[in-house]
Image (cartoon, rainbow, N blue to C red):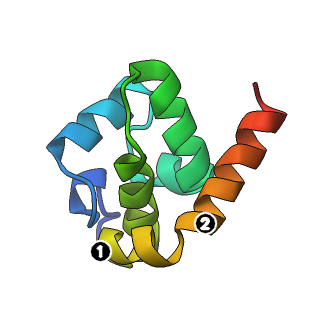
Amino acid sequence: MPAEPTIADLPGLGPKSRVMLAQAGIHNVEDLRALGAVVAYVRTKRAVGGVSLNLLWGLESALTGVPWQQVAREHRTSLLLALEDHERRNP
C-alpha cells in the first residue's frame, strides 16, 4: 500500500507555505483535506499574518492538482466568494 503523501509532496506549495501551514497547526495532508483550501487559508492568515492570496491559490492547487496559475485565473471568483462567506460567518 503506497504511503499517504505529505504536504511537501503536494503541488503548488513551497517551503514557505509549508512552514506557515505548520504554524497554523496544519501538519499533514489529512488536516488540509479536512479543512479545505478556504478554511486552511483563513486559519493560516490568522495564525501567521501577512499571508497573501497566493497561498489560497496554492492550497486549492495542492488539493485539486490544478496548477496554481490556472486556479488563480479560473477559480478566483468562486474562491473569493467562498472566502468572503466564511469570514462573514466566522468573524
The residue that label 1 is drawn on is: 2
Q: Nearer the viewer, residue 5 or 51?
A: 51
Whole-number angstrom distance, CA of label 2 to CA of label 1? 36 Å
SS of the residue at dot 2?
Answer: helix
The amino acid type, in three-letter code, at marker 1 is Pro
Give the side of residue 72 with respect to residue 82, left or right: left
In the picture, measured across the screen, residue 56 lies left or right of residue 39, that is: left
Name the amino acid type tagged 2.
Thr
Q: Residue at x 22, y 54 (%)?
A: 8
Which quadrant would the N terminus be assigned to in this image? bottom left
Question: Residue at (58%, 54%) from the top-left corner?
Answer: 36
Left or right of 23, for residue 8:
left
Q: Is residue 26 above or below residue 35?
A: above
Frontmost residue, 11 versus 25: 11
Residue 70 numbered tag: none
Where disc 1 sits, the SS reads loop
Q: Callout 2 environment at 10 Å: few (<14), some (14 to 19), or many (20+)?
A: few
Spot occupied by residue 27 in the image (x, y as percentages of width and height): 38, 38
Quadrant of the image containing the C terminus: top right
Query: Tag 1: Cα neighbours inside 10 Å, few (<14), some, or many (≥20)?
Result: few
Q: Residue 50's image quarter?
A: top left
Seen at 53% across and 72% down, the residue is 75
Specify the label residue 77 is tagged with.
Answer: 2
Position in image of residue 88 (x %, y %): 80, 36
Q: Is residue 23 above or below residue 63?
A: above
What is the x, y in percent for residue 49? 41, 22
In this view, the mark in front (2 or 1): 2
Q: Is residue 65 above or below residue 4?
A: below
Q: Position of residue 66 (x, y in %)?
A: 38, 79
Which residue sits furthest right?
Answer: 89
Disc nearer the start of the sequence (2/1): 1
